[in-house]
Image (tube, rainbow, N blue to C red):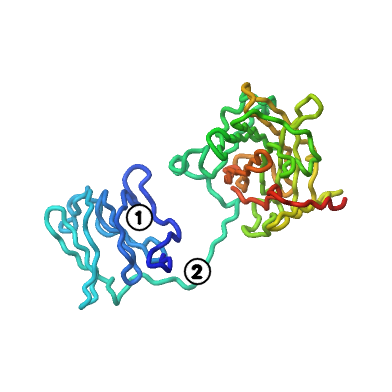
Amino acid sequence: MPDGKGGFQLKWRVGRSVLGGEARRGELTGGMRLFKPLNGLLTVVDQSRSGLFLYTDDGLYVDTLFPPGERKGTGVYQQPGEFFAGTVFTDAASGRIYYGSGKYTPLLYEMRGWSLQENPVRRLTTLPKAVVIRSSETASPPEIALSLRGGAGKARVARFAPALGGAVLDGSLTGWESAAPVIFGPGKDRTVEVRGLYDPDHLYLRWHVRLGAAFQPRSTPPLERLFTHDQSAETVGLYFQGDVNAPAKGPAVGRPGDVRLVFGLFKNGEKLVPAGVGLYPKWEGNKGVRQVYRTPVGEAVFEHVGKVEGLRLGHAIDEDGRGFVIVASIPRNAFPALKSGFDGTLRTQVNFDANLGGHQKSGGRTPMAQPAWRPMMNPARRGFTQDRGHR
């Protein structure tokens, strides 16, 4: 779309590529050249198979002109296959639109029904201007689409595998091999890998954090301050939307059903002890402990911040001392808005994050195929003050 400076900027990505096999209607094999819209229609030349693809200037696919080059018996409409030339132009005197091409013999085609005065496409004014898809309506992504986005570890989808016989919580990789990892982090020496399992009543998560330097655990802070800047601790977290039918929009701190869980590994005397805390923007239970986290750019208010009943944690330190593993068994009751158990049909929104040293925030921002992501306001940013609230 015009950027107001004489150039163009991306509005959104449109079009479909051939992902295997013969191209289907509307699928580009190798689109390279495009022409500015003429009377509302934009033309893309598919240089790998020849032929034209028409889109509205809003980016909606309209039609494909000419059959694939390998299809024989189409007479004068036969295209030469791979073709890097051709042009779409207008005749200013008549207003007609033409396509000129030809690998061996120059050919000129006149468009019928499309000119500077005619456009066969009509905008539907009765349709809604936006369509909102809830988490429960999200389909599983095709495998080939995941691979094109970097694979399961990089694409914005997290898949939780069934925990057959439960999950091992000693920090080892035993039993976790079947879970595809989600990988993120600020650099090649500072990475976070997350694997997820489930059974009907639990989510199981295994974070493996590589720090690029020796792990220096901090003393155990109060639960509500595990992740805050002043603790300078290494923490990992999970955002989870328990209401699969939650509306797409809501306050920045989180919608009803949103839950944030934060975990860290701390010193307790001579021992290393894992700890976890739950943060709930909305709380329907008893004895909620309200917390307000303030930053220079705003505040995050939680109706309850505290211990998660039934949470079990495990841990391990890497042999070289430059990383650690935290494993969590999270009971279903940690997500009060979740109406049914975990199974292979669940689709909701999640996000994984890490706050390394209390300063360096990074996140996987990853939809869940069992659990997609929607971050709540992060109260771990620098320079906050905290109100302890009331019980």
The N terminus - image quarter = bottom left
Q: Which mark is residue 127?
A: 2
Front position in the image: 72 or 107 = 107
Residue 228, by quadrant, is top right
Residue 68 at x, y percent in the picture = 25, 51
- In the image, residue 94 sits, relative to residue 284, either above or below, namely below
Give the amino acid at mark 1. Answer: Gly
Is residue 167 found left or right of 275 in the rendered image? left
Q: Residue, x 70% and y 55% (percent of image)? A: 253
Residue 2 at x, y percent in the picture = 41, 66
- In the image, residue 306 sits, relative to residue 8, either above or below, namely above
Q: Residue, x 70% and y 33% (percent of image)? A: 328
Residue 332 at x, y percent in the picture = 73, 41
Q: Secondary structure at mark 2?
A: loop
Is residue 283 something that shows in the picture? no
Front position in the image: 212 or 55 = 212
Is residue 203 something that shows in the picture? yes
Residue 345, by quadrant, is top right
* Circle nearer the N terminus (1, 2): 1
Is residue 207 found left or right of 144 in the rendered image? right
Q: Which mark is residue 133?
A: none
Is residue 145 found left or right of 49 in the rendered image? right
Q: Secondary structure at mark 1?
A: loop
Label 2 packing within 10 angstroms: few (<14), some (14-19), many (20+) = few
Give the amino acid at mark 2. Answer: Leu
Label 1 packing within 10 angstroms: few (<14), some (14-19), many (20+) = some
Front position in the image: 77 or 104 = 104
Q: Which residue is mark 1?
A: 26
